[in-house]
Every structure is written in C-alpha cells, then in structure tokens.
Amino acid sequence: MAKEYAVEIRNLIKEFPSPFRRKKHRAVDQVSLTIEPGEVYGLIGPNGSGKSTTMKALLGLLAPTEGECFIYGRNSLKVDSRQNIGFLPENPYFYKHLSGEETLDFYGKLCGMRGKMLRNRVAELLELVSLTDAKDRQLGGYSKGMLQRIGLAQAMIQHPKLLVLDEPTAGVDPIGSRQIRDLILQLKQQGITVFLCSHLLEQVQDVCDKVGIIFQGKMIRDGRLDELISMKGQKELIMSGVSDELLERIEKMIADDPQAKLLQAGSPRTTLERLFLSEVEKATD
Ligand SMILES: Nc1ncnc2c1ncn2[C@@H]1O[C@H](COP(=O)(O)OP(=O)(O)OP(=O)(O)O)[C@@H](O)[C@H]1O
C-alpha cells in the first residue's frame, strides 16, 4: 500500500495575472514536498518567494494553476480534506472587542462545538497558550505576542491533526517567539503535524524535522534538517577545563596526523538570541 503522507504537494504551479503585462507572474514553480504524520516541516525563503501561496494552495484557498495538493491522502480542493486542519494566517484578523475567551468560544461555535465540551476546550487552550489570566481582557488590549498565541489556540480549537502556521512569530519579540516555539514543540510531542513558514531561522532549526528552502517560487533544497546541516567529514569537540598545555598537545596530535586538519579552535559562541534571552531573564530576576 502506498505511504499516506499528512501533506503531499506534487509539482505545484501557481500563476497570478500581472496587471500591466501579458505574461502571468509565476509565484510558485513546480514545488513538491511531503510531510509525514507527526513531523514538523519548515518552509523558509526570502520575502515574496512563494511560501504563503504554497500554504494557501495546500489549504484549498487558492486553486493551483497546475499540480495537486493532498492532505492525508485527500485532494485539498475537496472540502472534507480540510476537516482536521488548523490554520494561523500571516496576519490573523480578530474582533478587537471580544475577550480571549469569547474569541475561542466564537471560533469553537463556528466549528459546531457547543456546551461543556466547548467550555472545557476553551479553558484547556487558554491554559496551553498561557492566557488564562488574560482571558477576560479584550483583544484590542493584547500585545502582538498574545495575539499570535490566541491565534494558535484558535487554530487548535477542534483538535486538528495538521496545523498550518504562516509566520507564527511575525512581529513577536524574542521572549514571545520563544513561548511560541515551546508551544510548537509541545504540539509535536502530542503527535500533531505542523507545516510552518518563518523568517526566524534559528527557531526553524529548533523545531523542525524537515526544511524546504524556496527561492523565486522554486524549491531549491529540501530534506531532513539534520542531514541538510551536518558538515560531512567534520567532527566537533566541545570541552571544558582545558588548559593551554592540553590544547597545544591536541593541536600537535592533529598536526602530526597526515589526514586530519584543524579547521577552528577557540571558545564556542552563544547566539544573539540566547544572549538576549538570558540577559532579559537576569534583569527580570
Ligand atoms: N493574490 C495575489 N495576486 C497577485 N500576486 C500575488 C498574490 N499573492 C501573492 N502574489 C505574489 O506572489 C509572490 C509570492 O508571494 P507570497 O506571499 O507567497 O510570498 P512569501 O514567500 O509568503 O512572502 P513573505 O515572506 O513576504 O510573506 C509575490 O511576488 C507576490 O507579490
């Protein structure tokens, strides 16, 4: 039996009419990708490279010019293929006068949920996205990070098997981004398949099993993250308590080996994001 992917995109082409030219603009050009159930897939690429268009085609919000998209084996142009999907769009629109709780209640009712089941689910999601304390505040007063988190909760209201997140951390500061990253990791542990796009490459690296790099509508590289970023033929040792003398001996051993070559020695660096987070944490304490 053929393998059933959570997501399968086959040779997707999407063209848009150009108002001032006869030729159409090809936003997505022969993109193919597969996501297995429970995997987190990150689509990365510069602005305008076709990430959102690919996601919208997968969600059946845009009809492909050519090619096909499947969700758990069903063509995504068929409405029933989308029953088990949650979607966080790039710029989600919310009713600003509703509270966080009312917002989730509203989306739950749109999905046909009612009564105790809905109340329990809303409470569970508010807890999950750490907004229980802010549940009665109107969304007009929420920060960008809180809005993205309520957006994520909205996308999860009916226990989706697949979550599609278009830049879930857009406009969110590093602390808010870290919270969203942790949430995605929690969803992954629950076995939920996630298809996301983001410009925060470090976060993509932290959460994704597979990555695709899209450029000018074309998939230029994709595969398992650990395979894509491993430096073939190189080894790394990170040591503590190493004296200068020991380091010299190690360097000499490497120099004496006819095959080996020391490429880099020094102190490992943290990332700017980690430095920022630890400094803010220290200042908060
Ligand atoms: N509805 C549309 N009509 C015409 N052109 C469109 C439409 N939607 C997208 N495009 C064009 O398609 C190309 C790809 O856009 P898309 O939004 O998919 O890029 P993206 O990679 O998501 O960009 P960003 O990182 O800035 O969100 C762009 O050139 C964009 O202008």
Image (spheres, rainbow, N blue to C red):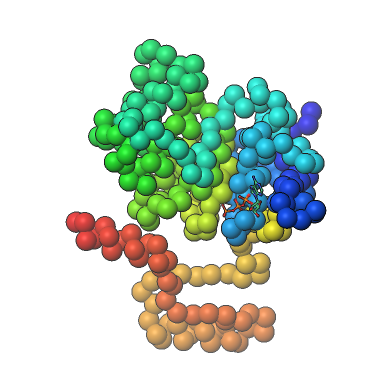
Q: How far across and how far down the image is residue 126, in percent?
A: 34, 31
Q: How far across and how far down the image is residue 9, in percent?
A: 72, 41
Residue 98 appears in the rendering: yes
In the drawing, does residue 209 fall left or right of residue 60?
left
Q: How far across and how far down the image is residue 82, in percent?
A: 62, 27
The residue nearer to you, when weighing 254 against 171, is 171
134 lies above or below 264: above
Which residue shows up at 52% across the image and 40% down it?
A: 89
249 lies above or below 278: below
Looking at the rendered image, the quarter that the N terminus falls into is: top right
In the drawing, does residue 19 fall left or right of residue 98?
right
Which residue shows up at 40% across the image and 18% down it?
A: 118
Looking at the rendered image, the quarter that the C terminus falls into is: bottom left
Quadrant assignment, res 271: bottom left
Q: How far across and how far down the image is residue 159, in percent?
A: 49, 26
Residue 194 appears in the rendering: no
In the drawing, does residue 105 fall left or right of residue 133?
right
